[in-house]
């Protein structure tokens, strides 16, 4: 039997050889073709080496959404250094924790994040991306890539506790890109719109998929629903990836104008996608592809294709080509039986910065998420296991309640947590952001929920807040959400 090579040609170098004149990146500063990106990344890699960065070093990067930042990502790959993904909107203590936990030897910053870089890491070199990108050294040539080598450290969202550094290998990104391409197809002229932070695994995965598939990436510096809609209309975007909150804001800004047919898929992950949101997107011709993904799987793990959304409501689809999904324990699952979601495949990480024994079992990753497989083998994601509310012996999944609350015309956003109750053990309490020009009517909202949910799932109290605490990736911070609850709220 022929052994499978552990080494492959470097992706950007091979792509520049195959399609040098194809558009690679766009954004602030214009468009860059693959031959230009190859030379640019080579010069940044040479500048990093001159600054003392060596192969296998971990380098913190405060990643902005720009072609220059994308070139830096490819430069680190070319050098063989490990990217430590940092978000420029985080607080200094969050960035400091990640740099220390990863053992980063330097941090790279953009002009907008210089103060954050210096405040978070005064003891290690802080390198200006603008200076690295302007370097005149001879470009560093492409190199063979070992698929087992670490490529990036991406921290989990930390919605219920301290973020955890997932060590993603080149193979993890490779298999994600290949499996995603086998599902979505690779179409000439494809262009990804990336409005997610590059510090999020979804943003990084888009960069890797694009260079492997030969697609273009249009990078936005930040998420703005008007800018996203305008780019979809005007720039020839065919693929994008968003979280449900982003999709909701896009639809609100869109009005009744349909989306162009060339947008062939909008992956929606980062949490369960409410059916009402799917239906609203469908009415505007937006080809929504509900997706279940994890930092630990280099993004996508399962996806429902747009043409199946109507026939498989509530589903996140089938596992990607090289992935396996189980419920509760390894092996076949009984249809409809709820339990922890387990995933296995070559795109699953082999460990974290602090080890892996607690979540990996014979290659199966225990995700901490709860869901079930239906009769067709489609995955349905219910919620995080740690977020589960047990009220009077009944399971209440906050995501399900939040989806109902978000469908109320007065509610812009909703977060649900459990509070202690002497009679029921726990009861659900909702914190909502009221839409502009509307007033909170808790009784009316509870009645609305009562028509759509079992009585034990209806929040005992609806509390208005100015905004919901979220991570840089847009996920709810449950621990901080509980801190906002009125202390008088104790149950029914």
Image (cartoon, grey):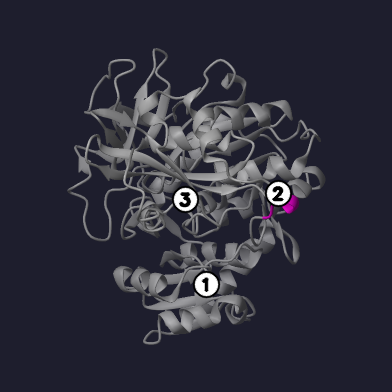
Side of 265 where 177 appears, left or right: left
Q: Residues within 10 Å of mark 2 (few under 14, many from 20)?
A: few
User: Which structural element holds mark 1?
Assistant: helix
- The x and y percentages for residue 362 are 19, 37
**Residue 101 found in image quarter:** bottom left
Q: How many marks?
A: 3
Q: Residue at x 35, y 47 (%)?
A: 6
Side of 428 where 35 appears, left or right: right
Which label was assigned to residue 45? 1
User: Which structural element holds mark 2?
Assistant: loop
Work out how far the residue at label 2 is from the one at label 1, CA to CA, in angstroms.
52 Å
The furthest residue to the bottom: 123
**Residue with the mark numbered 3:** 475
- Name the quadrant of the N terminus: top left
Work out how far the residue at label 2 is from the one at label 3, CA to CA, in angstroms.
25 Å
Asked if residue 411 is positioned above or below residue 314 in the image, the reply reads: below
- The x and y percentages for residue 307 are 62, 21
Residue closer to the observer: 453 or 77:
453
Q: Residue at x 27, y 60 (%)?
A: 353
- The x and y percentages for residue 177 are 50, 41
**Residue with the mark numbered 2:** 437
Asked if residue 190 is positioned above or below residue 450 in the image, the reply reads: below
Which label sits in the foreground, 3 or 1? 3
């Amino acid at each position: 039997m022929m052994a499978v090579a552990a080494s492959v040609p470097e992706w950007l170098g091979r792509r520049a050889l195959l399609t040098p004149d194809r558009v690679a990146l766009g954004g602030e500063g214009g468009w860059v073709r693959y031959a230009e990106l190859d030379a640019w990344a080579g010069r940044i890699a040479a500048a990093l080496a001159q600054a003392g960065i060596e192969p296998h070093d971990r380098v913190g990067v405060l990643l902005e959404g720009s072609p220059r930042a994308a070139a830096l990502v490819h430069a680190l790959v070319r050098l063989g250094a490990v990217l430590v993904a940092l978000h420029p909107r985080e607080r200094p203590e969050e960035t400091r924790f990640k740099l220390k936990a990863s053992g980063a030897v330097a941090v790279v910053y953009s002009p907008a994040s210089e103060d954050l870089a210096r405040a978070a890491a005064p003891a290690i070199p802080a390198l200006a991306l603008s200076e690295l990108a302007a370097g005149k050294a001879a470009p560093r040539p492409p190199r063979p890539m070992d698929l087992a080598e670490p490529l990036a450290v991406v921290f989990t969202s930390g919605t219920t506790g301290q973020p955890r550094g997932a060590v993603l290998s080149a193979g993890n990104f490779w298999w994600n890109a290949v499996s995603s391409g086998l599902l979505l197809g690779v179409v000439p002229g494809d262009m990804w719109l990336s409005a997610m932070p590059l510090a999020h695994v979804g943003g990084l995965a888009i960069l890797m998929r694009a260079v492997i598939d030969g697609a273009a990436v249009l990078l936005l510096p930040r998420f703005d629903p008007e800018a996203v809609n305008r780019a979809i209309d005007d720039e020839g975007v065919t693929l994008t990836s968003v979280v449900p909150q982003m999709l909701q804001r896009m639809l609100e800004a869109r009005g009744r104008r349909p989306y162009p047919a060339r947008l062939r898929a909008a992956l929606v992950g980062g949490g369960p996608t409410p059916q009402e949101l799917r239906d609203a997107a469908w009415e505007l011709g937006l080809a929504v592809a509900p997706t279940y993904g994890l930092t630990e799987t280099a993004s996508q793990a399962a996806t429902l294709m747009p043409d199946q959304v109507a026939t498989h409501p509530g589903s996140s689809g089938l596992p990607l080509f090289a992935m396996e999904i189980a419920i509760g324990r390894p092996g076949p699952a009984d249809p409809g039986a709820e339990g922890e979601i387990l995933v296995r495949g070559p795109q699953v990480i082999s460990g974290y910065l602090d080890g892996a024994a607690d979540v990996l079992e014979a290659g199966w990753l225990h995700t901490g998420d709860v869901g079930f497989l239906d009769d067709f083998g489609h995955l349905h994601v219910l919620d995080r296991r740690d977020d589960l509310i047990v009220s009077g012996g009944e399971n209440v999944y906050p995501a399900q309640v939040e989806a109902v609350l978000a469908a109320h015309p007065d509610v812009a956003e909703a977060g649900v947590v459990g509070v202690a109750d002497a009679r029921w053990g726990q009861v659900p309490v909702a914190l909502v952001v009221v839409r502009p020009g509307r007033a909170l009517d808790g009784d009316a909202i509870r009645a609305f929920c009562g028509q759509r949910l079992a009585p034990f799932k209806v929040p005992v109290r609806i509390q208005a807040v100015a905004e919901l605490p979220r991570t840089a990736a847009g996920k709810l911070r449950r621990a901080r959400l509980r801190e906002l609850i009125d202390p008088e709220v104790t149950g029914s």
